[in-house]
Amino acid sequence: MCCGTRQSRLSLAFTVGMMGLCTGLFPYTAFAEELSVNRQGASNQGVNSQDANSLDQSGQDQFSLEQDSQVQNNNNQGANRQSQDNLEPSAQEGNECVEATANPANLDLDNLENGVGSFPEVPEGAVIRNIEIYPQDIYHDYGEEENLRWYERTVNALHPVTFESAIKSQLLFSRGDTYDKDLIDESERSLRRSSYLYNAQIVASRVCGNVVDLAVVTRDLWTLLPTVGLSRSGGQNRTILGLSDQNFFGTGKKVSFSREEEEGKVEYSVDYFDPNLFGSRWQAGFQLADSDDGERQSGQVGYPFYRAGAPWSFKAAGFHEIRNDERFFRDESINEFQHNIELYDVSYGLSTFFDGSREERLYFGAAVENHQFSVVPETTGEIPADRKLRYPWVGYEWRDNEYLKAFNISQIQQVEDISLGWRNAVNLGWSDRSFGATSDQLVVKGESRYRHGDTFHLGTLALKGEGYWDFDDKTSENATLTLAGDFTQLNDERDRAWFTSLTFNYVHNLTLDNQLLLGGSSGLRGYPSNYQTGSHSFLFSAERRFFWDWYPLKTFHVAGVTFFDAGRAWFPGRDNGVNGKVLKDVGVGIRVTSSRIRVTRVLHMDLAFPLDRDDDDIDKMQLVLRGQQTF
């Protein structure tokens, strides 16, 4: 088995190579992103906002759903059947039992739409007698190991199956509870959000009168990976080397180390996140990073709203970073300065209303922001003024508790849990000189999103805004407003789709460390990054998507796309320079993701052709290679 044929060796080499490419584009950085604000720059800076889906979560509810619970680990696949001694005997005797027609352990999590066998209906008021955990390996053999190829058996042998305790800790029900379909569905969604699981399904394996046995079926992803990645967008290259494991020895904990280089600047970082601190619902994590032009440290601890209707939440987080910020015009850096950032936030959330279909939450918190600026050798112009904010804040959130299970909407051949209906939130804070702030300011943040549709048609409309009202100067500062919408339409076979999106941005009185930018990684794939800037912008995109049946090595899902982009960023009433008009591009691309390997993003490989080239410095073609959260 160690040698194999030439074809087998080439297959393994291709698999390992794609592991590195798919997973290396963007390492795990959730801790730094938790408190960071949208700042200007080529990769994670700027105040553009193009994806209405970013409004799905409130700023106070960033943790995944978890539940504290521990069970004895069993390293072999199969069921962990719990003791039944405490259930009333009368609930189990004298009733005919109905069993599933298929073995839950062999449920095909690659093909949930078609299903495998049938499972008994659960009567209203049934009591959960047993909970069986079936963790499938990366390449599940469905009881016939000889059907696996040699590299599939090798991957399974090298991979520790996820501890049943890690799976059990995310369930919102336990033995002896009354069966609740809403909690079953929410537990499924919680499991599917786990970075170390590809898919999950919870079914009734047996019903005897008014008692039910449940089977929890999950399939693992390969998570221990060398991070070897390259991305290119808008003429800028980014490379990453490192090692990460999103399921450390099967415990569900996340560890990563990386070296990242972009435009000659090198950064080293280490990340850790524990979603079930000491086996509880508490969560904690940290990130440490050091780069040529700065450093970054962040940490957080919290108790999330682990389910809809959970009574309370808590979060304390801190973020510190020293970095160099740049200002751009026509993709050229025109000024650079050092930015020292300190952000701290503590909050408590309280569920004030929940009726199963809608929930309201109230938040109380306090925040500290420090921004200090200094010159560097590359400084060629004015630098921003230092600013400090100290403010207590109160927030209110109301959301519909409605979800849609769909396929091929924003991912490729994978179950997607899409929230529907309204999701709204508003935060108000007061920053006062008496607290040590630079000036008296009202802090306002708000967002509203509505999504409607079915598994073939889905539309989203979202509005988001934030900013500060300075009572000393009687004006707003760093005010941003984004209106975004998108629509997806799939054909009956779900192998082709139309996708369109339109985004408008408006900003007012931005400080010098913020810019509204458009081009490359911030939209308009046929033009350099940070190509246009202004106080207004719009971006329209239309895509024709093709979902293919091609499934290389039973590991990678591949799709294709043709696209058209049109957009502009501008200052009204001002000369916006050469190519300051509406710009357009067309292109073709490939999308790759994996059903076996933990990939942080969907790999995008696009060839984009600009249609407006009044600027001779624009290339005839842009190669865009990057990772994105969605298709």
Image (cartoon, helix red, strand yellow):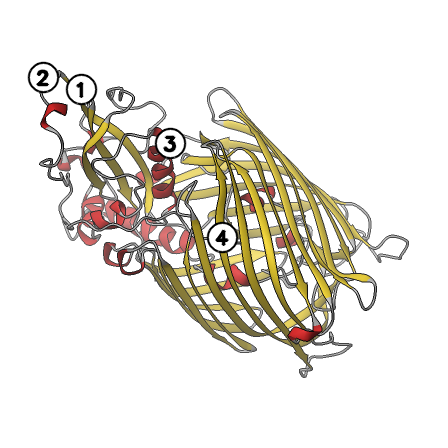
* Drawn side of residue 483 relative to residue 551, left or right: right
Whether label 2 touches label 1, CB < 8 Å: yes
Q: Position of residue 99 (x, y in %)?
A: 17, 21
> How far is mark 3 from mark 1, CA to CA?
21 Å
Q: Amino acid at mark 2?
A: Gly
> How far is mark 2 from mark 1, CA to CA?
8 Å
Report crowding for label 3: few under 14, some 14 to 19, many 20 or more residues within 10 A (C-alpha). few
Q: Amino acid at mark 1?
A: Gly
Is the residue 232 above or below the residue 551 in the image?
below
- Is residue 527 or residue 307 the one in the foreground? 307
Q: Which residue is mark 3?
A: 182
Indicate the secondary structure of the residue bearing disc 1.
loop
Q: Which residue is mark 2?
A: 94
Q: Which residue is mark 4?
A: 349
Q: Residue at x 70, y 64 (%)?
A: 514
Q: Amino acid at mark 3?
A: Asp
- Is residue 21 or residue 427 the one in the foreground? 427
Q: Earlier in the sequence, mark 3 or mark 1?
A: 3
Indicate the secondary structure of the residue bearing disc 4.
strand
Q: Residue at x 55, y 77 (%)?
A: 294
Whether label 3 touches label 1, CB < 8 Å: no
Q: Earlier in the sequence, mark 3 or mark 2?
A: 2
- Is residue 579 or residue 177 the one in the foreground? 177
Q: Position of residue 23 (x, y in %)?
A: 41, 54
Q: Is residue 49 visible?
A: no
> How far is mark 3 from mark 2, CA to CA?
29 Å
